[in-house]
Image (spheres, rainbow, N blue to C red):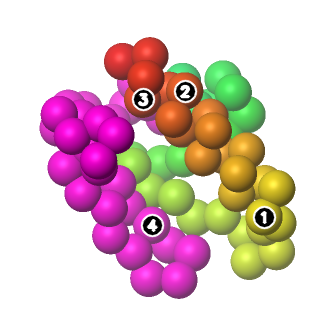
């Protein structure tokens, strides 16, 4: 939220289940991340839901975070 305060309203989660609430519809971000090879879903209209596998590695986490950062920067 600090890097994109006008776009990201908040992040909530429990364990590996995370939701990122956006200030605009989340569907375009889901599509952009899917093109980059990441499956993210929409909850309500403005929330991205991340549900990675329990076996996700640190490298894979870094990779999805980099793709998310790139996607948010493009908006």
* x and y percentages locating residue 13 in the rendered image: 39, 75
Mark 4 or 2, nearer chain start: 4
Q: Is residue 10 left or right of residue 3?
A: left
User: Of the numbered discs in the image, which one, if any, rests on residue 58?
Assistant: 1
Quadrant for residue 66, please give it.
Answer: top right
User: Of the numbered discs in the image, which one, if any, rests on residue 70?
Assistant: 2
- Distance, label 4 to label 3, CA atoms, is 17 Å
Labels 4 and 2 touching (C-beta < 8 A): no
Mark 1 or 4, nearer chain start: 4
- Distance, label 4 to label 2, CA atoms, is 19 Å
Compared with 56, 10 (above or below) is: above
Element at label 3: helix
Q: Which residues are magenta?
A: 1-30
Mark 4 closeness class: few <14, some 14–19, many ≥20 residues within 10 Å? some
User: Of the numbered discs in the image, which one, if any, rests on residue 72?
Assistant: 3
Mark 1 or 3, nearer chain start: 1
Number of numbered discs visible in the structure rendering: 4
Q: Is residue 69 magenta?
A: no
Quadrant for residue 36, please give it.
Answer: top right
- From the image, tell me which residue sits under label 4: 18
Given residues 58 and 38, the one toward you in this image is: 58
């Amino acid at each position: 939220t600090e890097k994109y305060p006008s776009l990201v309203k908040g992040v909530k989660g429990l364990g590996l289940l995370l939701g990122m609430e956006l200030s605009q519809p989340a569907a375009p971000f889901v599509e952009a991340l899917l093109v980059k090879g990441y499956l993210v879903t929409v909850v309500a209209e403005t929330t991205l839901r991340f549900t990675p596998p329990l076996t996700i590695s640190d490298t894979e986490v870094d990779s999805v975070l980099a793709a998310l950062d790139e996607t948010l920067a493009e908006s």
